[in-house]
């Protein structure tokens, strides 16, 4: 398999897995059942943005990303009783998104060094 195909499969499988993780976390904090496709696509866009910028060496994009997330958070209103749950959900979600994007960058930059990728690509 080609490097592009392997990395694309990694992306799709990881994003599906993350969607289910976030659905489970939302069920714990918000008692929501099901997938929120709007949130899924926003998360994918965030991780693609981070992947592209970090791959190109623009580490300051993490600061920009944090500022954007904070700016959108300031407009969010939660009932006082649910505020701690939302803050926890928000923090966990952002940390997971950044860690996954950094993982994508690592997989892309070290493709030839990862044994599984070597096996899949026939190297």
Image (tube, rainbow, N blue to C red):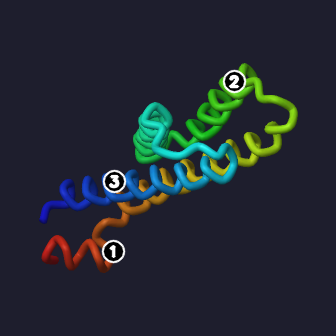
Q: Are discs 2 and 1 less than 8 Å apart at CB?
A: no
**x then y, percent, for residue 74:** 75, 23
**x then y, percent, for residue 114:** 34, 74
The relative height of residue 98 versus residue 3 in the rendered view (above or below) is: above
The answer for how far apart the CA atoms under marks 2 and 1 are is: 39 Å
Q: Nearer the viewer, mark 2 or mark 1?
A: 2
Residue tagged 2? 71
Identify the disc placed on residue 61.
none
Q: Is residue 80 left or right of residue 4?
A: right
Which quadrant: the C terminus? bottom left
The relative height of residue 115 versus residue 14 in the rendered view (above or below) is: below
**x then y, percent, for residue 25:** 61, 53
Q: Earlier in the sequence, mark 2 or mark 3?
A: 3
Residue 40 lies in quadrant = top left
Identify the disc placed on residue 11.
3
User: Is disc 1 surrounded by few (<14), some (14 to 19) or many (20+) residues within 10 Å?
Assistant: few
Q: Is residue 29 left or right of residue 108?
A: right
Q: Nearer the viewer, residue 14 or 25?
A: 25
The answer for how far apart the CA atoms under marks 2 and 3 are is: 28 Å
Q: Residue at x 58, y 53 (%)?
A: 96
**x then y, percent, for residue 11:** 33, 53
Residue tagged 1? 113
């Amino acid at each position: 398999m080609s490097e592009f195909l392997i990395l694309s499969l990694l992306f799709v499988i990881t994003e599906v897995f993350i969607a289910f993780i976030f659905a489970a976390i939302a069920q714990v904090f918000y008692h929501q059942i099901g997938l929120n496709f709007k949130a899924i696509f926003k998360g994918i866009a965030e991780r693609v943005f981070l992947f592209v910028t970090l791959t190109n060496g623009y580490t300051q994009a993490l600061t920009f990303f944090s500022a954007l997330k904070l700016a959108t958070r300031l407009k969010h209103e939660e009932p006082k009783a649910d505020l701690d749950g939302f803050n926890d959900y928000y923090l966990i979600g952002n940390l997971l998104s950044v860690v996954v994007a950094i993982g994508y960058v690592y997989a892309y930059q070290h493709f030839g060094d990862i044994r599984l990728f070597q096996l899949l690509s026939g190297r």
